[in-house]
Image (tube, helix red, strand yellow):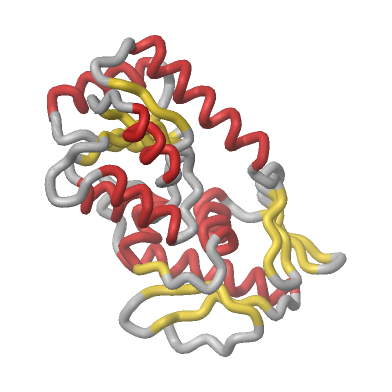
Amino acid sequence: MRILFVDDDRELCRAAQTLLEHEGYAVDTAHNGFDALEMAETGEFDGIILDWMMPEMDGISVLGELRRNGVTTPCLMLTARAEVEDRVAGLDSGADDYLSKPFNTAELLARLRAIIRRHEVYAPEVIRFGDVTLDKGTMELRCGDHSVRLGNKAFRLMEMLMENPHRVFTVDQMINRVWGWDNETEMNLLWVTVSQLRKKMAELGTAVEINAVRGVGYSLEEGHIADDA
């Protein structure tokens, strides 16, 4: 599972990354709200641990923007604020749980497991859009009586698009979601993966298409004529 840990305290981030990686999580870190928002909007994370007080953009603003954009990744809010109204504000902004600083590491891990577990209970195993379904368990894309099994990269890309239909993702967002933030993947690998997906979708005979938005990126549309990539 992949976790995004966000705090402007770099020493705390390093310590938390070591702790979480020891527990088997893959971890990315961010130190300000703007970077956190850009990374979290890709939807590539299974959980977010987000500090309230940060420079440039605070955690409440980041989380509010994510929820308005349809990002449902479970979030554990960290804050030194102790007042009841502050906790309420955090939860009302879309946080799944709240943990006061300084925190006990065992409690942090327990609360993280809990918010991810609750999210998994409600997360559908089969995503539907238009006349196609994507089974997360088998990585099969299906239309009517026909189905194809996707490779790992194609599946992750299709999952991203189907969970956010009509939303235009930039090339960078798609590369970061599928190949990771620290990966220097060339753009042509994304083009190849999109081309493979389009061919498989054509084989299925679906009306759903991956639409290229010139100079920006891609979106998933129903019955839309795609531009040249």
In the depicted structure, whether residue 85 falls above or below residue 137:
above
Name which residue lies at 84% across and 68% down. 144
- Of residue 70 and residue 140, the one placed in the foreground of this image is 70
Residue 109: percent from left, percent from top? 42, 17
In the depicted structure, whether residue 113 falls above or below residue 129:
above
- Of residue 144 and residue 150, the one placed in the foreground of this image is 144
Residue 153: percent from left, percent from top? 50, 53
Q: From the viewer's perspective, is 106 left or right of 29?
A: right
- Of residue 126 and residue 82, the one placed in the foreground of this image is 82
Q: From the viewer's perspective, is 149 left or right of 55?
A: right
Name which residue lies at 13% across and 30% down. 10
Q: From the viewer's perspective, is 195 left or right of 83?
A: right
Name which residue lies at 29% across and 55% down. 38
Residue 182: percent from left, percent from top? 26, 45
In the depicted structure, whether residue 107 falls above or below residue 70:
above
Q: Quadrant of residue 218?
A: bottom left
In the depicted structure, whether residue 25 falls above or below residue 222:
above
Residue 66: percent from left, percent from top? 39, 54
The number of callouts visible is 0
- Of residue 143 and residue 70, the one placed in the foreground of this image is 70
Q: Quadrant of residue 190?
A: bottom left
Q: Quadrant of the C terminus?
A: bottom left
Q: Quadrant of residue 212?
A: bottom left
Name which residue lies at 31% across and 62% down. 172
